[in-house]
Amino acid sequence: MIAQDAENGEVLMMAWANREALERTLDEGRMVYWSRSRQELWRKGDTSGHVQHWEELRVDLRRRT
């Protein structure tokens, strides 16, 4: 996932997400990612306080070969 500032388009971060992370993001209204190093879901801002809420989500469903 690429997270961008909704006001100016600045790229904030690139992170991994799986199906569960996306489902929770949609349910909770804030960004949930998959931590490959910890092998668990994490919510942006739980420890840092820098919470990310989503305004718009776009999905690229093209298969890459």
Image (cartoon, rainbow, N blue to C red):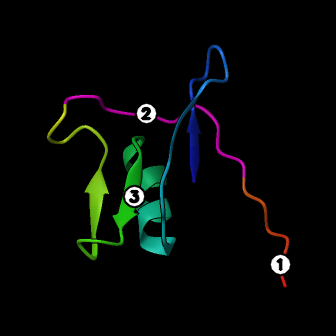
Residue range highlighted in magenta: 49-58
- The kind of residue on which mark 3 rests is Tyr
Considering every residue shown, the one lying at the far front of the view is: 37
Considering every residue shown, the one lying at the far left of the view is: 47
Location of residue 59 (image quadrant): bottom right
Q: Residue at x 65, y 44 (%)?
A: 57
Q: Earlier in the sequence, mark 2 or mark 3?
A: 3
- How far from the left and from the top, in percent, is residue 6? 61, 22
- The kind of residue on which mark 2 rests is His
In the rendered structure, are the residues bearing label 1 and label 2 in contact, judged by CB atoms less than 8 Å apart? no
Q: Left of 32 or right of it: where is 13?
A: right
- In this rendered view, identify the residue nearer to me: 9 or 26: 9
- In this rendered view, identify the residue nearer to me: 18 or 39: 39
- What's the distance in space between the residues labelled 3 and 1, CA to CA? 21 Å
Q: Secondary structure at mark 3?
A: strand
Residue identified by numbered label 2: 53
Residue identified by numbered label 3: 33
Q: Residue at x 27, y 57 (%)?
A: 42
Residue identified by numbered label 1: 63
- How far from the left and from the top, in percent, is residue 35? 33, 66
Check residue 50 for magenta coloring: yes
Q: Earlier in the sequence, mark 3 or mark 1?
A: 3
Instruction: Considering the whole magenta stretch, tell me its main secondary structure.
Output: loop
The correct choice, above or below, for 7 with respect to 20 in the image is above
The correct choice, above or below, for 56 with respect to 8 in the image is below
Question: Which mark is nearer the camera, 1 or 2?
Answer: 1
